[in-house]
Amino acid sequence: MRALALGPLLLLLAATSDSGEIGRIKSSVGTANVERGAASLSASIGQELMPGDWLVTGKDGRMSLTFVDDTRFAVGPDSRIGLKKFEYDPTTQKGSFIAKVERGSIAVVSGRITKSGRSGMQIETPDSVLEPHGTRFIVVVRK
Amino acid sequence: MVLLPDEDGGHGEVSILKAGGSETLVSEPNTRATIDGARPSIHPLGAKGLRPEEASLLGALPPPSKSFTLYFLEGTTEMTADSAPVLDALRAEIASRPGAEVQVTGHTDTVGSESENDALSLKRAEEIRSLLASRGFDLSIMTAVGRGERELKVPTADNVSSPVNRRVEVIVR
């Protein structure tokens, strides 16, 4: 019961800007969508991203994006990437970011969140969890 | 997973955690870790380098954010003459980036009270934001905040006039 009550409170605390924006789409090619709840929005340049969004590309699709802590992503074709959690305080430059690569590929340049401590950023894959410590890397989930 | 050197030549590390609780640290750049068995297998990229789809993914990353600093006359929201070319460079940078976001943060020196400086720093940031808006950039891509005298570029005692601390920092992403 306590965990249920905490959920909405944490979400409120996480909203560091008025809109709750955590990042924006910087490029989009082919079939590239942002899934938000039941809605599927075609990924457009400049589009704002929210915690909980899924980045979904088709076989001909790609997109790139930046986050407010300066993390950068490039998403490859046939991918499904969840932005499960993103909390960031621009003043203290600390926060927590959990992304999930359900399938497909991403290139990542980590941002200020990875300097928050050991588990500042986590990338979940079907059979592991990756914790980057300030770096550039590629994750490919093979079928 | 492939660990690469950073763009500035340094490199970080990636820990690989498996469900059983094992942890493997990948700390050498240009290393490929294959994570399907109980333990990741780790090999240098070697002469073969990245696969073509990996290389194109890397090439698709957005450029790093870029910062600009504009300076102000004491107690005012008036930019110094030297800052005019920086403002031009800032405008060019925003224009060159599809889907650009602009984060404008105002600062002051320690002359005046904290609350006056909070207000002045925000006014400086808003001045730059509206200057950019008047040059055709959409207000919705730009945020303005004031940090008062909390984040001095050069630390000083209270009530010290400091041209380098009277500034607006702009990050273009």
Image (cartoon, rainbow, N blue to C red):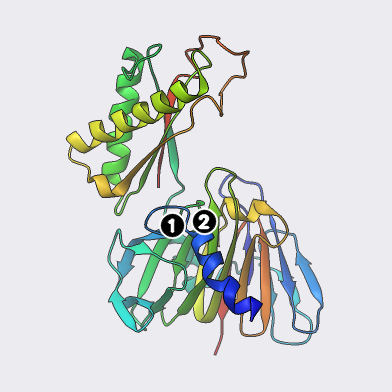
Residue B92 sits in quarter: top left
> Which residue is pictured at 47% across the width and 63% down the height?
A73
Can residue B40 be spotted in the picture?
Answer: yes
Task: Name the side, left or right, on which A31 lies relative to A64.
Answer: left
Residue B1 sits in quarter: bottom right
Q: Is residue B95 above or below residue A62?
A: above
Out of A19 and B133, give the one closest to the viewer: A19
Q: Are marks 1 and 2 in contact (CB under 8 Å)?
A: yes
> What chain letter is assigned to the residue under label 2?
A
Out of B165 and B31, give the one closest to the viewer: B165
* x and y, in percent, of residue B126 in the image: 32, 32
* x and y, in percent, of residue A138 in the image: 57, 68
Mark 1 to mark 2: distance in Å? 6 Å
* x and y, in percent, of residue A53 in the image: 43, 73
Residue picked out by circle 2: A71
What amino acid does circle 2 point to? Answer: Thr
Q: Quadrant of the N terminus of chain A?
A: bottom right
Mark sitting earlier along the chain (1/2):
1
Secondary structure of the residue carrying tag 1 is strand
Can residue A30 be spotted in the picture?
Answer: no
> Which residue is pictured at 39% across the width and 64% down the height?
A49
Task: Name the side, left or right, on which A132 lies relative to B50.
Answer: right
Q: Which mark is residue A66?
A: 1
Residue B154 sits in quarter: top right
> What chain letter is assigned to the residue under label 1?
A
Both marks 1 and 2 on one chain? yes
Q: Which mark is residue B6?
A: none
Q: Quadrant of the C terminus of chain A?
A: bottom right
Task: Name the side, left or right, on which A98 lies relative to B91.
Answer: right
> Which residue is pictured at 35% across the width and 48% down the height?
B101
What amino acid does circle 1 point to? Answer: Thr
Out of A82 and B130, give the one closest to the viewer: B130
